[in-house]
């Protein structure tokens, strides 16, 4: 953590100028930050509002985090006159008053509240409290409902580099959920929450406890204009056991009253196909299409994008044709048929309507959909499922053990003991492959890849272990051979 002893190292990294025991950084004629080591004082710009002076001394290591965070705000372009330290609120009859470390305003409206913690243990503890009951940040939110964003912040110097963590909560309701509320008043919205506990409950259940990063200080973020940036492929993360994906998946089904787990698993497979084809087609700097773009997407635009990806994926991986109507279909058909040829447009429309009636299925229906209200309900579930998986990477150059384990757990949740279906666990299929003379088989086939056929493919464990075993016996960084050699 940053301490009084390491503070000079921080100031060097932040390009402060030293004059004796006073270090200074000037942003403009009226805005400068200073550190006075003789008096052990952190000096902020005069037009920055400070309510409690104890944040300006060396008595707490947390003060150095606040100082560094204010520096980062000024560097980003926020004006000192819009920043307030130690804003005080009364937190209720049974609690002491609380002071927010940093508040930032925009046109006199509260834009963000930032709670600063020392890096490591204290930050992790505060993050756990935030997830458990909302902590102080949710108490401040309840006191000032105009706030747009809440942020937990920590920074430190590790290996001579300044690093930071910043988990952020969006404090406004999704427009699509506000639309859904008009037909389903059971949907929890922040607008209808009357206390801290209800705000936290809605954040956890309606918004799945979603935390954002890089919104305040990311390279693509501008001061005062905070928005959730679209995901790029380079932003995707590896799956982590600590993220408890299975629990989150089940929680989505529970609070949306989805009882048919087998159907839910089938819908999840369709989503994985969408995500798979999306990742394969994108380079590292491209925006991925498998994401819910908050503030931009409607339920319709999200599902249309998924339908297109699914159509491409089924054709590419399964050689199956899926009927898909692009958004431009109506304009296209009437631009192709002019004058007397318009009669052919009617024929084509009849053909299309026939396909829609008899040859299509909604591959993303976690609930049956046969009217607008049910479409909106299903749209909410679809958004939550996409948000659950959108930030993770599922395409790897070699087998990813946790991803395989995750898929197996999802499979067991969706199918186990349904209709007498049971699947051979991976350790057993791995043992079977380890028992086969695979190297001899490869040698006898003129060093070509052997064909593997599973006539009763359920979970696919025999086939996935086959890929791993053959790659170990005949190393190759390119898995294109799988397309022609692994059959189900």
Image (cartoon, rainbow, N blue to C red):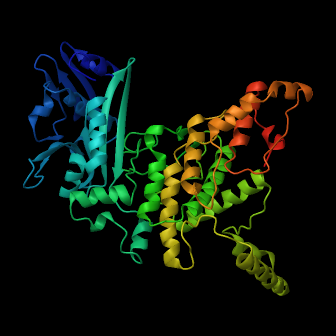
Quadrant for the N terminus in the image: top left
Q: Say if 302 sits above or below 158 in the image.
A: below
On the image, the x and y values in percent for residue 187 come to 37, 69
Residue beneath the point at 70% across and 40% down: 464
Residue beneath the point at 55% across and 43% down: 406
Residue beneath the point at 22% across and 65% down: 194
Residue 243 visible within the image: yes
Q: Nearer the viewer, residue 37 or 206?
A: 206
The outermost residue toward the top is 20
Q: Say if 130 sits above or below 125 in the image.
A: below
Residue 477 visible within the image: no
Residue beneath the point at 57% across and 65% down: 301
Snapshot quadrant of residue 73: top left
Is 50 positioned to the left or the right of 166 in the image?
Answer: left
Q: Say if 129 sits above or below 342 in the image.
A: above
Is 78 positioned to the left or the right of 49 in the image?
Answer: right
On the image, the x and y values in percent for residue 20 come to 19, 12
On the image, the x and y values in percent for residue 203 come to 34, 56
Q: Nearer the viewer, residue 368 or 48?
A: 368
Snapshot quadrant of residue 200: bottom left
On the image, the x and y values in percent for residue 469 come to 73, 31
Snapshot quadrant of residue 271: bottom right
Q: How many badges with numbers are in the image?
A: 0
Is 243 positioned to the left or the right of 45 in the image?
Answer: right
Q: Nearer the viewer, residue 452 or 277?
A: 452
């Amino acid at each position: 953590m940053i301490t009084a002893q390491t503070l000079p190292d921080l100031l060097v990294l932040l390009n402060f100028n030293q004059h004796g025991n006073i270090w200074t950084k000037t942003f403009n004629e009226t805005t400068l930050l200073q550190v006075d080591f003789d008096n052990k004082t952190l000096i902020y710009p005069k037009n920055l509002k400070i309510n409690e002076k104890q944040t300006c001394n060396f008595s707490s290591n947390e003060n150095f985090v606040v100082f560094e965070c204010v520096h980062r705000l000024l560097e980003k372009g926020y004006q000192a006159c819009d920043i307030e330290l130690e804003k005080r609120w009364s937190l209720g009859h049974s609690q002491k008053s609380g002071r927010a470390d940093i508040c930032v305003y925009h046109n006199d409206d509260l834009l963000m509240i930032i709670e600063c913690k020392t890096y490591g243990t204290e930050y992790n503890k505060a993050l756990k409290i935030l997830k458990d009951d909302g902590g102080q940040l949710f108490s401040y939110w309840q006191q000032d409902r105009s706030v747009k964003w809440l942020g937990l912040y920590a920074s430190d110097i590790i290996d001579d580099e300044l690093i930071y963590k910043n988990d952020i909560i969006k404090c406004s309701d999704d427009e699509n959920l506000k639309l859904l509320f008009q037909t389903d008043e059971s949907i929890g919205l922040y607008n209808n929450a009357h206390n801290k506990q209800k705000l936290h409950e809605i954040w956890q259940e309606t918004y799945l406890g979603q935390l954002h990063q890089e919104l305040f200080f990311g390279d693509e973020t501008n001061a005062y204009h905070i928005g959730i940036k679209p995901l790029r492929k380079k932003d995707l993360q590896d799956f982590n056991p600590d993220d408890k994906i299975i629990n989150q998946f089940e929680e989505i089904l529970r609070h949306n009253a989805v009882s048919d787990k087998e159907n839910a698993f089938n819908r999840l497979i369709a989503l994985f196909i969408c995500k798979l084809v999306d990742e394969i087609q994108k380079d590292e700097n491209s925006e991925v299409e498998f994401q819910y773009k908050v503030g931009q997407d409607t339920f319709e635009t999200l599902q249309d994008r998924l339908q297109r990806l699914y159509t491409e994926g089924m054709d590419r991986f399964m050689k199956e044709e899926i009927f898909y109507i692009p958004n431009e279909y109506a304009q296209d058909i009437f631009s192709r048929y002019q004058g007397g040829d318009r009669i052919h447009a009617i024929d084509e429309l009849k053909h299309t309507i026939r396909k829609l009636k008899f040859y299509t299925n909604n591959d993303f229906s976690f609930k049956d959909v046969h009217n607008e209200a049910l479409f909106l309900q299903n749209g909410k579930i679809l958004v939550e499922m996409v948000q659950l998986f959108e930030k993770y990477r599922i395409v790897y150059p070699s087998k990813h053990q946790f991803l395989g384990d995750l898929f197996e757990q999802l499979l067991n949740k969706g199918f186990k003991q349904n209709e007498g279906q049971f699947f051979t666990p991976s350790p057993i299929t791995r043992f079977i492959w380890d028992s086969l003379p695979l190297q001899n088989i490869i040698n006898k086939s003129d060093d070509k890849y052997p064909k593997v056929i599973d006539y009763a493919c359920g979970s696919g464990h025999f086939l996935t272990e086959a890929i791993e075993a053959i790659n170990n016996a005949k190393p190759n960084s390119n898995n294109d051979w799988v397309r022609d050699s692994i059959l189900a």
